[in-house]
Amino acid sequence: LLLAIVGAPWCRGVVVLGGGVLGVGAALLWTAQGRLMLEYSDGTDQGRLFAIFWALFNCSSVVGGLLTFFYFSHHSEEAPVSLYLIFLGCIVLGGAATALLAPPHTIARPAASASASAEQRVAAAAPATEDAATPLPLLPPA
């Protein structure tokens, strides 16, 4: 927007620098989000937790698109401040809702850790013979 409005040569550098800062910030936030999800998991429900997150994340895109559609179907403004305020309110409410999350260390988990249960599954799947060169079958017998 800055480049389109002002058109000065220095605007291109500002846009590239801003994109870099946003990229680094997004990388940090996505890494923290993944780490937090793993902290809440006991090792057996990671897939379910990530599925719930992605479902909510994609639902927010759908709700945002529907909100914009219905807003513009009743208003003819080109740059509505009220729509901006509606989205700002949603963002603030979402950020405030994170205060409702329980700290990961207070979540009750089974006694076995994720790595221990993974080691137990590997040991159970290993062949009973002492010949370690025997490969595991890819498909169960029919």
Image: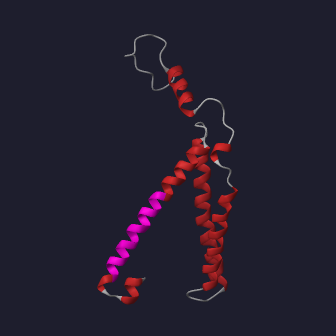
Is 7 within the magenta?
Answer: no
Residue under the image location 47 percent in, 58 percent down:
28
Q: Is residue 17 left or right of residue 97?
A: left
Identify the image quadrant of residue 96: bottom right
Image x and y of residue 89, in percent: 66, 74
Q: In the rendered view, tell whether residue 1 sits above or below residue 46.
A: below
Q: In the rendered view, tell whether residue 98 sits above or below residue 13.
A: above
Image x and y of residue 65, in percent: 59, 71
Image x and y of residue 75, in percent: 65, 87
Question: Which residues make up the magenta segment?
Answer: 11-28
Q: In the rendered view, tell whether residue 26 sits above or below residue 65.
A: above
Is 19 within the magenta?
Answer: yes
Return the residue nearer the eye: 126 or 7: 7
Residue under the image location 40 percent in, 15 percent down:
132
Magenta stretch: dominant secondary structure: helix
Identify the image quadrant of residue 95: bottom right
- Quarter holding the N terminus? bottom left
> Can residue 30 be seen?
yes
